[in-house]
Amino acid sequence: MDTSEKGIIGKGSSSICRKGRIVETGVLVAIKVYRLGDTEQKQAALTKLERTIEVLQKLQAPFRRPSDSKLWNAQLETVQPAKLFMRLLDYSKDAAGRPGFDNEHGQLYVVTELAQYSLKDFLNERKKVSAPPSKETVRSIAKAIVLVMAGLHAKGFVHLDMKPENLMFFDGCLKLIDVDGCVEIGTRISADDLSISFSPVYCAPEWASFILDKNSRKKDKLGICALPGLDTWSVGCTICELVTLDAILVPAYRNWVAQFGRRGEARFMDSLAKMQKAPLPAKVQQFDDELVELMTNCLLVCPKSQRRTCAESLDCPYLQPDKLQRTKSNPIRVQAYAEEDDDDEREGGVEEV
């Protein structure tokens, strides 16, 4: 593992990710090491590790058509899971060989394939040179994002912290990372669950309501049910950022914090919880009429009962395959569809359940 400053790929409140190399083969990898604090924090880190291993292993299995038809789209029939989700290579194990604290150093870590950069990195570079992606590139990346999340939901999971930092480019293929906060669809999330992370400017109105209840110490509530719509909203925010080059709710968040200091975040969450209309900036509204339709009819729909799933959104006119064009500036060079790869790379098809 590269322990130098240059070896750091990313840092979070609960972990740090560094570059590494498999000694036997020389293959470069990513090593995520969890931060360990007091007993409660150690347990939360262990829960995240166990969840990460379980989720990553399930994500690489062939797709199986879910019982909920709203979580399935025919486009997933030819998709390779390995082209949507980061591959697991190794992880720390306890004495019994289960995911846990490493016997030698007492650490918790996960080893995965190594990405080159995140979607956030791509957007930051575009922002530095004042060169937003072209309409063709935005459409292509938007399609990849919706496909990735439709695949996750078809697998039966909700991510809960979907944002540009958690989508990375692996040799030209866009994949989802940071699955240690994923939970199965329908899971009740407790207000006291330290293993769950979220980002205020990407979270859905109903999640904002849940956080406000948590902060007001309404412990008698059962929590919030993890449903795909929570991710759908975050997907909408992420796609809009391809146009604006900054999270669309950041200006509102900063205004609240500037006015009210530490109380500003709660005020922001309250305004989000009460939101009645899709928060589309002028740049997005003027960018592409079909993109606006995707946002207002599918993804950034405030009433959760009217928000469409990512699988349903794949049928939106904006995301139709015949409208996708490859451009030189597009960072996506590898598609997720099996028919575009060599025969020896193809995986199993769709299984009925």
Image: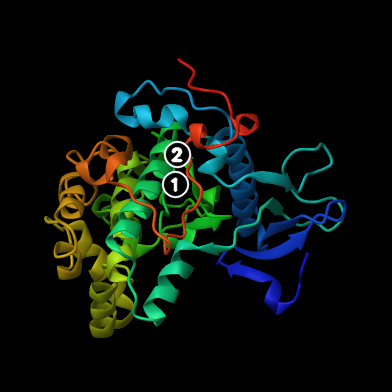
The alpha-carbon separation of the residues under discs 2 and 1 comes to: 8 Å
Tag shown at residue 148: none
The residue labelled by disc 2 is 152
Q: Please report contact status of discs 2 and 1: CB closer than 8 Å, yes or no.
A: yes
- The residue lying toward the viewer, choosing from 47 and 239, is 239
Q: Secondary structure at mark 2?
A: helix
The residue type indicated by label 2 comes to: Leu
Residue at figure coordinates x 47%, y 23% from the top left: 64
Tag shown at residue 159: 1
- The residue lying toward the viewer, choosing from 285 and 53, is 285
Rendered location of residue 159, percent (x, y): 44, 47
| Residue 247 sits above or below residue 212 on the image | below
Rendered location of residue 7, percent (x, y): 70, 72
The residue type indicated by label 1 comes to: His
Residue at figure coordinates x 86%, y 56% from the top left: 23
- The residue lying toward the viewer, choosing from 307 and 226, is 307
Residue at figure coordinates x 53%, y 42% from the top left: 83
Residue 258, quarter of picture: bottom left
Q: 242 left or right of 290?
A: right
Q: 229 left or right of 271?
A: right
User: Coloured how?
Assistant: rainbow
Q: Earlier in the sequence, mark 2 or mark 1?
A: 2
Rendered location of residue 61, percent (x, y): 58, 30
Q: Secondary structure at mark 1?
A: loop
Q: 295 left or right of 126?
A: left
Rendered location of residue 279, percent (x, y): 18, 62
Residue 11, quarter of picture: bottom right
Q: Which residue of the protein is positioned furthest toward the top in this rendering?
A: 353
| Residue 256 sits above or below residue 266 on the image | below
